[in-house]
Amino acid sequence: DCSVVMERPCLKKADRRFLCKEIMMRGSAGAPSSMPHHWIRGNVPLCSCCMVCKQQCGTQPKLCDYRCVWCQYTVHDECMVDSLRTEDCTFGEFKDLIIPPYYLSAINQMRKEKRTNYEKVVPYCSKHWMPVMVLANTRSGTNMGEIFLGEFKMLLNPVQVFDLSKIAPAKALQLCTWLPCSAVRVLVCGGDGTVGWVLDAIDEMKIKGQERFIPQVAVLPLGTGNDLSNTLGWGAGYAGEVPVEQILRNVMEADGIKLDRWKVQVTNKGYYNLRKPKVFTMNNYFSVGPDALMALNFHAHREKTPSLFSSRIINKAVYFFYGTKDCLVQECKDLNKKIELELDGERIELPNLEGIIVLNIGYWGGGCRLWEGMGDEPYPLARHDDGLLEVVGVHGSFHCAQIQVKLANPVRLGQAHTVRLILKSSKMPMQVDGEPWAQGPCTVTITHKTHALMLYHSGEQTDDDDASISSDQNTVKC
């Protein structure tokens, strides 16, 4: 947490010699509103400058110079004076994101006294304080999440950083109840599935009556797909090209927006209503047809040999293989004869199709703006906060590929508040947000569930419709 580097045999000795980063102040009388620097010697970052003489630190080939584990300021051995050892720490560039140990100490004391007016403690912190929580899925993106855990703990209070492989989002988010209402920002490091997991936990907070503590959510996209993060301006994938410091700056500067979340209910035909309907929550899209078939084949292959799927390139190659195979086999042909589609209760006459895709967000299929298509013909504006879904049809895998490289338009079937699909016969592949399954005759009903508070970063926008985004920028004031 304090980024001290040592050889493994020296670990116990270092634990005795160096105090690690405190997450909460202990043994202090009253309610402190400041704390001194926490200096450690050596392991000074490259290109750091002394806060006293402004010259470069850490240039000698030995363990030298000091760094504060909170504000990250550095100082030469010869420039270190007693006044610096007792000087109050400012928490540096990220003071608005850090939860100070003295804040947690004060809140802990108030909880013991069963007082809940935490707002009285907030003036001790920065006027523009917006503490951030980092929730990292260490299994996403070739285990890049593990690297981020250490880097974020170095810059923030370690209590703000959570490994989702060890603690569930619902439990981690209880920290929000210790913090000012509507001030917390959450950075989710993972794929769209991880984001959905965290948003589900936030919905649980609403059920518990903790709605005033609900945070806004930013995304650091790991793994493959990442259509939601792309829609929100955080990019299609992160491979370490941006420093962690810049990621935190982006979180500070991001604007609040809303995201529709949808309930997908799948009711099987027959069984005399003895089977409970399957219920999903959708953030991105629902589909039946060739893209769901590719996702189903990919998922089955990955379950058998997970070690092979360790990079985005391999994953995309496998998708390409199954897409090419479906172009030849056409397993989903004549879908229009097997399915009935209703938009807001109105039956839609379907042309010859192999697939139907229901969209909530702008991106689909790893970076394709499906509703927009080639952009050469007028189409209704699509937003992710208007309570409307966009419904399109595709003629097959080859048509999907043409749309992705802007050589064809989708079959736009309409927009609706409620979508109903009736699968009359046979078994068809379906998916919700990349989670596929094979489905027999059923009725699929998609209705609005709730809104999620998200953070939009304009700096990473790629191929977005400026008009669409500007209309989304009705910034949420919480």
Image (tube, grey):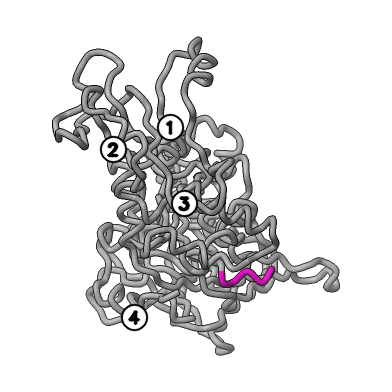
Residue at the spot x=40%, y=29% of the render? Answer: 3
Image position of 139 (left or right of 257): right
Residue 73 marker? 2
Q: Which residue is mark 1?
A: 2
Q: What amino acid is at disc 4? A: Leu
Q: Which residue is mark 4?
A: 381
Front label number (3 vs 4): 3
Q: Quadrant of the C terminus?
A: bottom left
Residue furthest to the bottom in view is 346
Q: Residues within 10 Å of mark 3 (few under 14, many from 20)?
A: many
Asked if the residue at tag 4 contacts the one at tag 1, i.e. Cβ–Cβ closer than 8 Å, the answer is no
Is 209 contained in the magenta span?
yes
Tell which circle, 2 or 4, labels the residue nearer the N-terminal end: 2
Tell which circle, 1 or 4, labels the residue nearer the N-terminal end: 1
- Secondary structure under badge 4? loop
Asked if the residue at tag 4 contacts the one at tag 2, i.e. Cβ–Cβ closer than 8 Å, the answer is no
Task: State the residue in front, 441 or 121.
Answer: 121
Tell which circle, 2 or 3, labels the residue nearer the N-terminal end: 2
Tell which circle, 1 or 2, labels the residue nearer the N-terminal end: 1
Tell which circle, 3 or 4, labels the residue nearer the N-terminal end: 3
